[in-house]
Image (tube, rainbow, N blue to C red):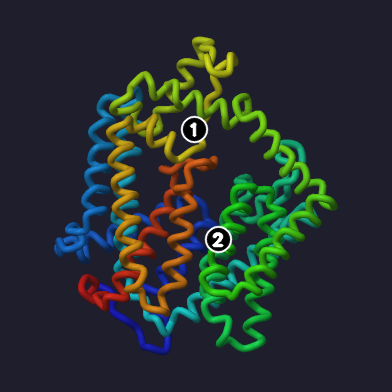
């Protein structure tokens, strides 16, 4: 289906990969079109080859998705549950499409450089919005409802920090893997990039994104740098945070509110959402409420003035429980939760076994995608809805990238796309 271009240029697979960070900026509609197109290309090109379905985690994932559809018939809001369950299939085929893209190792520096130019622009736009309260396109901050937060090009969605973080991990991994061989100019370019990415993430007010950024670059430094450079990076991060906390009211406010939520977790917003998820899960241990039905059941309880017995306060509701594992548990039940855990554990075991087989050129992609994948699975953190377009796209794109690195390293990249 895909005819490769001249070796001088990026082929259509590589261009498709580069489009991912661009379509995210155009929000859910464009991102859904991108994901669906990838799924369709996979189905029409390689579904006839059944070898991919011999991969055990993929078998489990397919069983899990079929299970989601089946439990929809018992959901309170059947239509919403069924639509959401069926729509998850697009992620399944999309991640397999990414896994079998033909990405040439000699084009990786070009891909990373082009990606860095885009993220540099996003970073400068966010920093401009921080200092002037409006970005390059006139999108302003919201000092009343969301003080000390940045939105950048995402308008009213406060996700600019996570966007910068995830793509900075990919760019940073590639740079650190080549730090000894690049020119002085390249070192200045990429070191400046990492510093500015860190600052913009810090100023975005997204605490989880900042923790992921720090953790990711700490891990990457352990992989690629010596102890002196590791210590230097860690010291710079600590000093930057201390300086920002003492001289920036926005950073200080966000850190203090985070500390207060941890100390008073039981009565905090996240704590109350966690307990509401547990209460709703107890109503249907085995199969859960069905996708996107946590909000329906919770709203029904709230309308009845239900009191949360764990906090002695009115039950708190939202569109999702703000934790991936609780969301899976409450909406798919213990059966779905076990299937999901089997998928994760079998995937992780496969990734660990594959590390030594990954070629050096693809290892930065592998490590960065694995870190992003793991960041979604860290259990003790708040998170966006796992089944949403935005959060789901990062997770499944990362999963596809990990598989891509394994497939490319085994030199079977042309087995499916012809």
Question: Which of the labelled discs sits on residue 30, or is there none?
Answer: none
Residue that carries the numbered disc 1 in the rendered image: 321
Rendered view: 304 above or below 242: above
Horizontal and vertical percent position of residue 418: 22, 75
Residue at 35% x, 26% y is 289
Rendered view: 272 above or below 374: above
Residue at 51% x, 52% y is 27
Image side of residue 143 versus residue 268, left or right: right
Rate crowding at label 2 as few (under 14), some (14 to 19) or many (20 or more) other CA atoms within 10 Å: many
Q: Nearer the viewer, residue 125 or 396?
A: 396
Where on the picture, by quarter, is residue 400?
bottom left
Residue that carries the numbered disc 2 in the rendered image: 216
Cα separation between marks 2 and 1: 25 Å
Image side of residue 104 versus residue 168, left or right: left
Q: Nearer the viewer, residue 307 or 246?
A: 246
Q: Is residue 31 visible?
A: no
Horizontal and vertical percent position of residue 349: 32, 57
Of circles 2 and 1, the one toward us is 2
**Residue lying furthest top:** 304
Image side of residue 291 versus residue 309, left or right: left
Horizontal and vertical percent position of residue 408: 31, 74
Residue at 75% x, 48% y is 251
Image side of residue 407 versus residue 251, left or right: left
Horizontal and vertical percent position of residue 34: 40, 58
Q: Are marks 2 and 1 in contact (CB under 8 Å)?
A: no
Quadrant that contains the N terminus: bottom left
Q: Nearer the viewer, residue 56 or 33?
A: 56
Element assignment for label 1 = loop
């Amino acid at each position: 289906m895909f005819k490769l271009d001249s070796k001088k240029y990026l082929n259509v697979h590589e261009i498709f990969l580069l489009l991912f960070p661009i379509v995210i900026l155009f929000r859910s509609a464009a991102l859904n079109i991108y994901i669906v197109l990838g799924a369709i290309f996979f189905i029409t090109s390689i579904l006839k080859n059944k070898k991919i379905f011999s991969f055990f985690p993929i078998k489990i994932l397919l069983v899990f998705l079929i299970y989601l559809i089946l439990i929809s018939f018992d959901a309170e809001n059947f239509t919403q549950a069924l639509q959401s369950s069926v729509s998850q299939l697009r992620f399944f085929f999309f991640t397999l499409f990414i896994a079998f893209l033909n990405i040439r190792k000699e084009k990786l520096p070009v891909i990373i450089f082009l990606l860095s130019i885009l993220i540099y622009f996003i970073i400068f736009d966010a920093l401009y919005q921080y200092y002037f309260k409006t970005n390059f396109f006139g999108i302003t901050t919201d000092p009343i409802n969301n003080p000390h937060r940045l939105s950048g090009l995402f308008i009213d969605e406060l996700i600019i920090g996570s966007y910068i973080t995830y793509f900075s991990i990919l760019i940073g991994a590639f740079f650190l893997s080549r730090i000894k061989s690049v020119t002085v100019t390249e070192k200045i370019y990429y070191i400046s990039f990492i510093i500015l990415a860190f600052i913009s993430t810090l100023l975005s007010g997204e605490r989880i994104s900042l923790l992921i950024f720090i953790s990711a670059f700490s891990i990457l430094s352990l992989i690629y740098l010596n102890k002196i450079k590791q210590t230097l990076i860690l010291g710079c991060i600590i000093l930057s945070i201390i300086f920002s906390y003492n001289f920036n009211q926005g950073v200080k406010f966000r850190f203090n509110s985070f500390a207060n939520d941890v100390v008073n977790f039981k009565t905090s917003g996240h704590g109350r959402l966690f307990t509401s998820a547990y209460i709703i899960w107890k109503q249907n241990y085995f199969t859960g409420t069905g996708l996107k039905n946590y909000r329906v059941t919770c709203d029904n309880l709230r309308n009845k003035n239900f009191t949360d017995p764990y906090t002695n306060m009115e039950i708190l509701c939202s569109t999702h429980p703000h934790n991936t594992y609780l969301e899976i548990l409450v909406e798919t039940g213990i059966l779905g939760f076990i299937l999901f855990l089997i998928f994760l554990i079998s995937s992780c075991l496969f990734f660990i076994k594959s590390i030594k087989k990954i070629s050096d050129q693809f290892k930065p992609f592998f490590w960065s995608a694995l870190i992003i994948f793991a960041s979604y699975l860290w259990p003790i953190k708040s998170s966006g809805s796992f089944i949403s377009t935005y959060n789901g796209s990062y997770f499944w794109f990362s999963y596809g990238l990990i598989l891509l690195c394994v497939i490319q390293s085994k030199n079977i990249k042309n087995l499916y796309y012809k």
